[in-house]
Amino acid sequence: MMPDKKTLDIKICGLKTGVALAAALVGGASHVGFIFFPKSPRNVAPSEAGRLRKLASGRAKAVAVTVDADDAFLDTIVAEMQPDMLQLHGSESPERVSDLKARHGLPVMKAFPVRETADLAAITPYRGVVDRFLFDAKPPKGSQLPGGNGVSFDWTILARLDAGVDYMLSGGLNAANIREALQLANPPAIDISSGVESAPGVKDAALIEQFFKAVRAARDDRAA
């Protein structure tokens, strides 16, 4: 059974322009993500993210995505962007998560790479520490990016999670496969980045619109 229409969170991640942000907001995104990782084609400066974040204020929660960022960089991001949530996409320990929550007074979402059922065991020491998990496909060999690689994993794995685990499903989602993803995983939230791009790091407003249409169609069919 799919999540109720009122409870499915949708995050468009890796935003860099006002046009793409507007498309995400019009489509109904509950969360918008800004990536601070120089190796990513979606990397954005904290000051620019702050400008865009203001446009989303009151309409969607703004998420700052980092990869093993140090305190100084995170201090700058939080000061200039004023995010609603931090997303940690590196190897941050439970202790690091707790320290950052205390330092910034913000909820934290922690990303975990998944390929097989055994990978889900990695969340155990983080339970009760992070506010939400994000499950992304393990990067393909040779990739320098922990996420945004456009690859997916076996979504049926997530059916083995306890009902109380709050998470976002990420990795390889697009308008063509979102129906299957929702049917197989029944996630409380979804996250998409490369699946709405015309080129790496280039969000396409038309693809964003198509994705939201596909989500609505899949959920309407299920409800009917």
Image: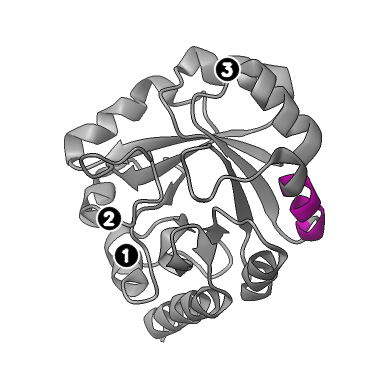
Q: Residues within 10 Å of mark 3 (few under 14, many from 20)?
A: some
Can see residue 163? no
Residues under labels 3 and 1: Cα distance? 31 Å
Q: Secondary structure at mark 1?
A: helix
Q: Position of residue 101 (x, y in %)?
A: 64, 23
Residues under labels 1 and 2: Cα distance? 10 Å
**Circle 1: residue type:** Ala
The image shows residue 205, relative to residue 139, as above or below, that is below
Q: Position of residue 148 (x, y in %)?
A: 40, 51
**Circle 2: residue type:** Ser
Going from N to C along the chain, the mark reached first, 1 or 2, is: 2
Q: Is residue 82 left or right of residue 173?
A: right
According to the picture, the residue beneath numbered tag 1 turns out to be 181
Going from N to C along the chain, the mark reached first, 3 or 1, is: 3
According to the picture, the residue beneath numbered tag 2 turns out to be 152
Q: Residue at x 41, y 65 (%)?
A: 195
Residues rendered magenta in the picture: 49-56
